[in-house]
Amino acid sequence: MTAGLLFVSASAAGAVGYGLCGSGHQLVDSAPIGSLGTAYLTWNAKAGTNCVVVVRKEPGAAVSMNAMIGRDDGVQDVDSGYYTSYAGPVFVNGRGSCIDWGGVIQNQEVNRWNSHCG
C-alpha cells in the first residue's frame, strides 16, 4: 500500500470528475446495481445539494435506466429513460434532511433510504 495515492474507478471518475453533478460535488457514497453498474451520491457543501448519477459498467445499446434522489419530506428528482451509459444527474437540497437515493439498470435495482442525514 502506498500512502498518498487514491485510485478511483473510471465510473466514479465519470460521476464526479467529469462534472455530471457539477463543480463542487464530492463523492460521499456509492452502491452497486447488481453486476450492471453503480449509483453514485455526491454532496456540494457550498450549495447544500446532493446529486445522484447512475453509471453503467459496460456502456452500449440504450437500456432502461433510472436515477432517483429524494428527501424525507417527499421532495424528489427522478431521471428515467433509455440510456447508453448513465442516468441523471438528479438533485435535491439536502440540508437538514435525510436522503433517499438509488437507481435502476434494466431489471437490477438499488435503494438507500434515510441516509446521510444532516
Image: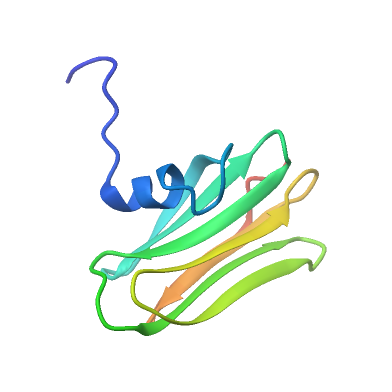
Colour convention: rainbow
Q: Residue most toward the top?
A: 3
Residue occupying image coordinates x 29% and y 16%: 4
Which residue lies most toward the left here?
A: 1
Q: What is the total number of numbered labels drawn onto the structure image?
A: 0
Residue 73 falls in image quadrant: bottom right
Quadrant the N terminus occupies: top left
Q: Is residue 46 above or below residue 77?
A: above
- Residue 117 appears at what percent x and percent y? 70, 45
Q: Is residue 115 left or right of residue 7?
A: right
Q: Tell me residue 112's x, y (percent).
A: 55, 61
Q: Nearer the viewer, residue 19 or 94?
A: 19
Q: Position of residue 85 (x, y in %)?
A: 34, 69
Q: Is residue 112 visible?
A: no
Residue for point 55% across, 46% down? 42
At 72% from the left edge and 68% from the top edge, which residue is drawn?
Answer: 76
Question: Left or right: where does residue 99 sit relative to residue 60?
Answer: right
Q: Residue at 78% x, 66% y: name it.
A: 75
Direction from residue 72 to residue 101 in the image, left or right: left
Instruction: Give the quadrant of residue 91.
Output: bottom right
Quick check: can you spot residue 24? yes
Q: Is residue 112 above or below residue 44?
A: below
Instruction: Say which quarter of the image contains residue 108.
Output: bottom left
Pick whichever, 108 or 26, lies toward us: 26
Return the residue nearer the eye: 80 or 19.
Answer: 19
Q: Quadrant of the C terminus?
A: top right
